[in-house]
Protein backbone atom coordinates (compact mmCIF):
# COMPACT_ATOMS: atom_id res chain seq x y z
CA UNK A 1 0.00 0.00 0.00
CA UNK A 2 1.28 3.48 -0.81
CA UNK A 3 2.16 5.47 2.32
CA UNK A 4 0.10 8.29 3.78
CA UNK A 5 -2.95 7.85 1.57
CA UNK A 6 -5.63 7.08 4.19
CA UNK A 7 -6.47 10.75 4.73
CA UNK A 8 -7.13 11.24 1.03
CA UNK A 9 -9.45 8.22 0.95
CA UNK A 10 -11.38 9.42 3.98
CA UNK A 11 -11.75 12.90 2.48
CA UNK A 12 -13.23 11.35 -0.67
CA UNK A 13 -15.47 9.12 1.40
CA UNK A 14 -16.81 12.10 3.32
CA UNK A 15 -17.41 14.03 0.09
CA UNK A 16 -19.35 11.18 -1.48
CA UNK A 17 -21.31 10.54 1.72
CA UNK A 18 -22.42 14.17 1.76
CA UNK A 19 -23.42 14.29 -1.89
CA UNK A 20 -25.01 10.89 -2.57
CA UNK A 21 -28.71 10.53 -1.84
CA UNK A 22 -29.04 8.24 1.18
CA UNK A 23 -31.15 5.09 1.36
CA UNK A 24 -32.23 4.94 -2.28
CA UNK A 25 -34.24 1.73 -2.70
CA UNK A 26 -32.74 -0.74 -5.16
CA UNK A 27 -35.93 -0.56 -7.22
CA UNK A 28 -35.14 3.08 -8.03
CA UNK A 29 -31.72 2.28 -9.53
CA UNK A 30 -31.39 3.59 -13.06
CA UNK A 31 -31.62 1.37 -16.09
CA UNK A 32 -28.11 0.71 -17.39
CA UNK A 33 -28.16 -0.19 -21.06
CA UNK A 34 -25.09 -1.74 -22.65
CA UNK A 35 -23.30 -2.73 -19.43
CA UNK A 36 -21.82 -5.80 -21.13
CA UNK A 37 -19.06 -6.02 -23.70
CA UNK A 38 -18.54 -8.39 -26.59
CA UNK A 39 -14.85 -7.47 -26.89
CA UNK A 40 -11.97 -8.61 -24.66
CA UNK A 41 -13.02 -8.13 -21.07
CA UNK A 42 -10.74 -7.05 -18.21
CA UNK A 43 -13.21 -6.31 -15.37
CA UNK A 44 -16.74 -7.58 -14.78
CA UNK A 45 -18.49 -5.76 -11.91
CA UNK A 46 -21.94 -6.87 -10.81
CA UNK A 47 -24.39 -5.50 -8.23
CA UNK A 48 -21.83 -3.38 -6.40
CA UNK A 49 -23.10 -1.63 -3.27
CA UNK A 50 -20.71 0.44 -1.17
CA UNK A 51 -21.37 1.70 2.35
CA UNK A 52 -19.39 4.16 4.46
CA UNK A 53 -20.59 3.11 7.90
CA UNK A 54 -24.40 3.40 7.56
CA UNK A 55 -24.33 5.67 4.52
CA UNK A 56 -24.65 4.09 1.09
CA UNK A 57 -22.49 5.60 -1.67
CA UNK A 58 -23.06 3.16 -4.54
CA UNK A 59 -26.30 1.41 -5.46
CA UNK A 60 -26.34 -1.83 -7.46
CA UNK A 61 -23.67 -0.85 -10.00
CA UNK A 62 -22.89 -3.34 -12.77
CA UNK A 63 -20.37 -2.59 -15.49
CA UNK A 64 -18.00 -4.37 -17.87
CA UNK A 65 -14.63 -2.80 -18.62
CA UNK A 66 -12.71 -3.84 -21.71
CA UNK A 67 -9.04 -4.60 -22.16
CA UNK A 68 -6.75 -2.43 -24.33
CA UNK A 69 -9.13 0.49 -24.09
CA UNK A 70 -9.81 3.60 -22.00
CA UNK A 71 -13.07 3.74 -20.06
CA UNK A 72 -14.07 7.15 -18.70
CA UNK A 73 -16.25 7.56 -15.60
CA UNK A 74 -18.07 10.90 -15.62
CA UNK A 75 -20.67 12.57 -13.43
CA UNK A 76 -21.13 15.33 -10.83
CA UNK A 77 -18.88 15.57 -7.79
CA UNK A 78 -19.77 13.06 -5.10
CA UNK A 79 -21.74 10.76 -7.41
CA UNK A 80 -19.66 7.64 -6.67
CA UNK A 81 -17.17 7.60 -9.56
CA UNK A 82 -14.06 7.40 -7.39
CA UNK A 83 -15.70 4.96 -4.99
CA UNK A 84 -16.40 2.62 -7.91
CA UNK A 85 -12.89 3.10 -9.30
CA UNK A 86 -11.38 2.03 -5.96
CA UNK A 87 -13.55 -1.08 -5.97
CA UNK A 88 -11.53 -2.37 -8.93
CA UNK A 89 -8.36 -2.90 -6.91
CA UNK A 90 -9.84 -3.04 -3.41
CA UNK A 91 -8.44 0.32 -2.37
CA UNK A 92 -11.61 0.84 -0.35
CA UNK A 93 -10.25 -1.85 1.98
CA UNK A 94 -7.97 0.76 3.57
CA UNK A 95 -11.02 2.69 4.84
CA UNK A 96 -12.16 1.03 8.08
CA UNK A 97 -15.76 2.21 7.79
CA UNK A 98 -16.14 1.13 4.16
CA UNK A 99 -18.00 -2.05 3.18
CA UNK A 100 -18.34 -3.39 -0.36
CA UNK A 101 -20.84 -6.02 -1.49
CA UNK A 102 -21.29 -7.53 -4.92
CA UNK A 103 -18.81 -9.07 -7.32
CA UNK A 104 -15.79 -7.82 -9.25
CA UNK A 105 -13.96 -10.22 -11.55
CA UNK A 106 -10.52 -9.54 -13.03
CA UNK A 107 -9.87 -11.76 -16.05
CA UNK A 108 -12.73 -13.96 -14.87
CA UNK A 109 -11.47 -14.39 -11.30
CA UNK A 110 -13.30 -12.89 -8.30
CA UNK A 111 -11.14 -10.35 -6.44
CA UNK A 112 -13.37 -10.04 -3.34
CA UNK A 113 -12.27 -13.26 -1.71
CA UNK A 114 -9.87 -14.15 1.08
CA UNK A 115 -7.77 -16.04 -1.48
CA UNK A 116 -6.77 -12.74 -3.13
CA UNK A 117 -3.95 -10.73 -1.55
CA UNK A 118 -4.89 -7.04 -1.99
CA UNK A 119 -1.22 -6.03 -2.17
CA UNK A 120 -0.58 -8.39 -5.08
CA UNK A 121 -3.85 -7.31 -6.67
CA UNK A 122 -2.69 -3.68 -6.63
CA UNK A 123 0.50 -4.71 -8.40
CA UNK A 124 -1.74 -6.05 -11.19
CA UNK A 125 -4.09 -3.06 -11.07
CA UNK A 126 -2.10 0.11 -10.52
CA UNK A 127 -3.50 3.46 -9.47
CA UNK A 128 -2.66 7.10 -10.21
CA UNK A 129 -4.19 9.67 -7.92
CA UNK A 130 -5.62 13.15 -8.43
CA UNK A 131 -2.64 14.89 -6.86
CA UNK A 132 0.85 13.69 -7.81
CA UNK A 133 2.21 11.83 -4.80
CA UNK A 134 5.86 10.91 -5.37
CA UNK A 135 7.48 9.21 -2.42
CA UNK A 136 10.13 11.20 -0.49
CA UNK A 137 12.78 9.25 -2.37
CA UNK A 138 14.94 9.71 -5.43
CA UNK A 139 13.41 9.55 -8.89
CA UNK A 140 15.06 6.14 -9.36
CA UNK A 141 13.83 4.77 -6.03
CA UNK A 142 10.28 5.98 -6.69
CA UNK A 143 10.08 3.77 -9.76
CA UNK A 144 12.11 0.93 -8.23
CA UNK A 145 9.88 0.72 -5.14
CA UNK A 146 7.25 -1.64 -6.57
CA UNK A 147 9.61 -4.01 -8.38
CA UNK A 148 11.71 -4.27 -5.20
CA UNK A 149 8.88 -5.18 -2.83
CA UNK A 150 7.34 -7.60 -5.32
CA UNK A 151 10.66 -9.24 -6.22
CA UNK A 152 10.37 -8.49 -9.93
CA UNK A 153 14.11 -7.91 -10.45
CA UNK A 154 16.72 -10.63 -10.02
CA UNK A 155 19.60 -8.18 -9.61
CA UNK A 156 20.59 -4.52 -9.77
CA UNK A 157 21.04 -4.58 -13.54
CA UNK A 158 17.53 -5.94 -14.08
CA UNK A 159 16.10 -3.39 -11.64
CA UNK A 160 17.81 -0.56 -13.53
CA UNK A 161 16.36 -1.88 -16.78
CA UNK A 162 12.84 -1.89 -15.31
CA UNK A 163 13.25 1.68 -14.04
CA UNK A 164 14.59 2.99 -17.34
CA UNK A 165 11.93 1.23 -19.41
CA UNK A 166 9.15 2.48 -17.10
CA UNK A 167 10.40 6.06 -17.31
CA UNK A 168 10.61 5.76 -21.09
CA UNK A 169 7.04 4.43 -21.31
CA UNK A 170 5.93 7.37 -19.16
CA UNK A 171 7.68 9.77 -21.52
CA UNK A 172 9.90 11.04 -18.72
CA UNK A 173 13.30 9.41 -19.16
CA UNK A 174 14.85 11.99 -21.48
CA UNK A 175 13.91 14.75 -19.03
CA UNK A 176 15.36 13.08 -15.93
CA UNK A 177 18.06 10.69 -17.13
CA UNK A 178 20.78 12.87 -15.59
CA UNK A 179 18.83 13.46 -12.37
CA UNK A 180 17.81 9.97 -11.26
CA UNK A 181 19.41 10.41 -7.84
CA UNK A 182 17.52 13.67 -7.16
CA UNK A 183 14.25 13.74 -5.16
CA UNK A 184 11.09 13.03 -7.13
CA UNK A 185 9.42 15.85 -5.24
CA UNK A 186 11.69 18.32 -7.03
CA UNK A 187 10.02 17.72 -10.39
CA UNK A 188 7.30 19.91 -11.87
CA UNK A 189 3.67 18.91 -11.32
CA UNK A 190 3.32 17.32 -14.75
CA UNK A 191 6.62 15.49 -14.36
CA UNK A 192 5.61 14.26 -10.91
CA UNK A 193 2.40 12.82 -12.34
CA UNK A 194 4.33 11.04 -15.09
CA UNK A 195 6.73 9.77 -12.41
CA UNK A 196 3.72 8.32 -10.57
CA UNK A 197 2.58 6.69 -13.80
CA UNK A 198 6.08 5.25 -14.29
CA UNK A 199 5.92 3.93 -10.73
CA UNK A 200 2.54 2.33 -11.45
CA UNK A 201 3.64 0.61 -14.66
CA UNK A 202 6.94 -0.60 -13.16
CA UNK A 203 5.12 -3.58 -11.62
CA UNK A 204 3.91 -4.56 -15.12
CA UNK A 205 0.21 -4.13 -14.32
CA UNK A 206 -2.66 -5.36 -16.45
CA UNK A 207 -4.73 -2.25 -15.75
CA UNK A 208 -4.26 1.29 -14.45
CA UNK A 209 -6.90 3.28 -12.58
CA UNK A 210 -6.61 7.07 -12.87
CA UNK A 211 -8.51 9.35 -10.52
CA UNK A 212 -8.64 12.79 -12.19
CA UNK A 213 -4.94 12.57 -13.07
CA UNK A 214 -4.88 15.92 -14.88
CA UNK A 215 -7.00 18.08 -12.58
CA UNK A 216 -3.96 19.85 -11.09
CA UNK A 217 -2.02 20.17 -14.35
CA UNK A 218 -1.70 22.88 -16.97
CA UNK A 219 -2.94 22.28 -20.55
CA UNK A 220 0.51 21.30 -21.88
CA UNK A 221 1.08 18.73 -19.11
CA UNK A 222 -2.49 17.49 -19.54
CA UNK A 223 -1.92 16.95 -23.26
CA UNK A 224 1.22 14.92 -22.50
CA UNK A 225 -0.63 12.72 -19.99
CA UNK A 226 -3.46 12.16 -22.47
CA UNK A 227 -0.97 11.22 -25.17
CA UNK A 228 0.64 8.82 -22.73
CA UNK A 229 -2.72 7.21 -21.92
CA UNK A 230 -3.27 6.61 -25.63
CA UNK A 231 0.07 4.81 -25.83
CA UNK A 232 -0.46 2.74 -22.68
CA UNK A 233 -3.90 1.45 -23.68
CA UNK A 234 -2.25 -0.61 -26.41
CA UNK A 235 -0.94 -2.95 -23.72
CA UNK A 236 -3.38 -2.62 -20.79
CA UNK A 237 -6.80 -1.44 -19.64
CA UNK A 238 -7.23 2.10 -18.35
CA UNK A 239 -10.13 3.45 -16.30
CA UNK A 240 -10.16 7.20 -15.74
CA UNK A 241 -12.35 9.36 -13.52
CA UNK A 242 -12.63 12.83 -15.01
CA UNK A 243 -14.73 15.95 -14.54
CA UNK A 244 -13.68 17.15 -17.98
CA UNK A 245 -16.15 15.95 -20.56
CA UNK A 246 -13.79 17.24 -23.24
CA UNK A 247 -11.09 14.95 -21.87
CA UNK A 248 -13.44 11.97 -21.76
CA UNK A 249 -14.43 12.64 -25.37
CA UNK A 250 -10.79 12.96 -26.45
CA UNK A 251 -9.23 9.93 -24.80
CA UNK A 252 -11.84 7.27 -24.07
CA UNK A 253 -13.46 4.59 -26.16
CA UNK A 254 -16.25 3.94 -23.65
CA UNK A 255 -17.94 6.25 -21.15
CA UNK A 256 -20.05 5.55 -18.06
CA UNK A 257 -22.21 8.26 -16.47
CA UNK A 258 -22.81 8.14 -12.71
CA UNK A 259 -25.41 10.17 -10.79
CA UNK A 260 -26.41 9.99 -7.11
CA UNK A 261 -24.57 6.75 -6.57
CA UNK A 262 -26.08 4.89 -9.53
CA UNK A 263 -24.76 4.05 -12.96
CA UNK A 264 -27.21 5.84 -15.23
CA UNK A 265 -25.87 4.57 -18.54
CA UNK A 266 -22.76 3.53 -20.38
CA UNK A 267 -21.77 2.93 -23.95
CA UNK A 268 -19.42 3.92 -26.72
CA UNK A 269 -18.10 7.41 -26.00
CA UNK A 270 -19.41 8.89 -29.24
CA UNK A 271 -22.88 7.54 -28.55
CA UNK A 272 -22.93 8.83 -24.97
CA UNK A 273 -21.97 12.34 -26.07
CA UNK A 274 -24.10 12.56 -29.22
CA UNK A 275 -27.11 10.34 -28.54
CA UNK A 276 -27.47 9.45 -24.83
CA UNK A 277 -30.36 7.18 -23.87
CA UNK A 278 -31.16 8.86 -20.55
CA UNK A 279 -32.37 12.44 -20.04
CA UNK A 280 -30.08 12.82 -17.02
CA UNK A 281 -27.05 12.08 -19.17
CA UNK A 282 -28.19 14.66 -21.71
CA UNK A 283 -28.73 17.20 -18.93
CA UNK A 284 -25.24 16.62 -17.51
CA UNK A 285 -23.50 16.79 -20.87
CA UNK A 286 -25.29 20.01 -21.78
CA UNK A 287 -24.58 21.58 -18.39
CA UNK A 288 -28.12 21.64 -17.01
CA UNK A 289 -27.09 19.51 -14.01
CA UNK A 290 -23.78 18.95 -12.24
Image (tube, rainbow, N blue to C red):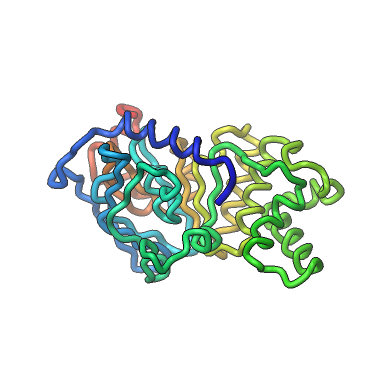
Of 32 and 124, which appears nearest the observer?
Answer: 124
Of 244 and 125, which appears nearest the observer?
Answer: 125
Left or right: where does residue 46 sit relative to residue 141? left
Quadrant of the image containing the C terminus: top left
Q: Residue furthest left?
A: 27
Residue at horizontal 42 percent and vertical 62 percent from the top: 66
Q: Is residue 223 above or below residue 198?
A: above
Residue at horizontal 61 percent and vertical 45 percent from the top: 225
Residue 252 coordinates in the image, percent (x, y): 47, 51
Residue 153 coordinates in the image, percent (x, y): 71, 69
Left or right: where does residue 38 sit relative to residue 253? left
Of 9 and 192, which appears nearest the observer?
Answer: 9
Q: Quadrant of residue 51 in the image?
A: top left
Residue at horizontal 45 percent and vertical 43 percent from the top: 241
Residue 55 coordinates in the image, percent (x, y): 27, 37
**Residue 141 visible in this rendered orientation of the protein:** yes
Residue 126 coordinates in the image, percent (x, y): 54, 55
Amino acid sequence: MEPNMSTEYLDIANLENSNVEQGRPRSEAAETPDITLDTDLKFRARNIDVFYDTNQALFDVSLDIGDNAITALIGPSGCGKTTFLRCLNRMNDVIDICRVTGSVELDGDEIYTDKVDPVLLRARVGMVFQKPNPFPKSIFDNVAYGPKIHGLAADKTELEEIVVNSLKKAGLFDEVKDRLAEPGTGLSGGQQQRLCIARAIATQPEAILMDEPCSALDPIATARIEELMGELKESLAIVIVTHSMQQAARVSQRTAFFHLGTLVECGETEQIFTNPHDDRTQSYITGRIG
